[in-house]
Image (cartoon, helix red, strand yellow):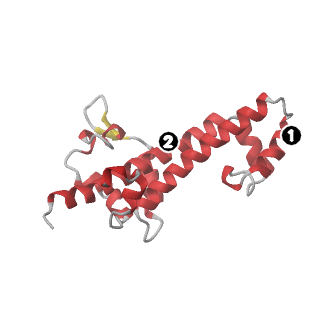
Amino acid sequence: MAGDIPLLERLAQLPAVPVDEAIGLVDTLAEPGADPVIGPLFGNDDEGNIVVNPLVPVVLEHMQQKQDATCYTALLEGLTGIWNAAVRAAVVARLRASGLPPDDLLLRLQKLSPTLGFASGTGETAREWLADPFTQDALLVQQCVVRLLFALRAMAETRGGELITPS
């Protein structure tokens, strides 16, 4: 039964949706601000002009840089970024709670996992992150959420078209 298939497997079964379709959503939707998925990224200023969350253009530009990228890939990148930030926070909280000195904590972080992002960076990268992990990862998570929302919305457009088009 289709409802029993996990979400990511169902999404992977969709035809590949070019990332350009996610980027073009702003232009193709009559009122992007009224959309239940990406609408919260849009608003109005005091004069009634449409304003866009400053992360939207940055994320869409970054998505556009990867040729032949698909929305499924963008979705997985967004989920991976959020996952890595969550794991980093959990690891650091546990290491700090164990009383590990800061320099030892840095060494442990660099050795634990390349997906935490410290193994490939310099010691200074890890030090900067440890000084203010909230600021360092909050922006990453916000960017990942924007990427995820646009990718999901574009994939939903494709699925919606499949549902209403007779086969």
Image coords of residue 71 (percent x, y)? 40, 60
Q: Residue at the location (56% across, 38% down)?
A: 138
Say what amino acid the circle numbered 1 marks.
Asp
Quarter of the C terminus within the rendering = bottom left
Image coords of residue 73 (percent x, y)? 46, 61
| Residue 103 image label | 1
**Helix, strand or loop for disc 2:** helix
Q: Which residue is mark 2?
A: 142
**Helix, strand or loop for disc 1:** helix
Q: Residue at the location (49% across, 51% down)?
A: 78
Q: Residue at the location (66% across, 37% down)?
A: 89
Say what amino acid the circle numbered 2 marks.
Gln
| Residue 138 image label | none
Relative to 57, 35 lies left or right: left
Nearest the camera: 4 or 26? 4
10 Å neighbourhood of mark 2: few (<14), some, or many (≥20)? some
Rendered view: 143 above or below 40: below
* The quadrant where residue 98 appears: top right
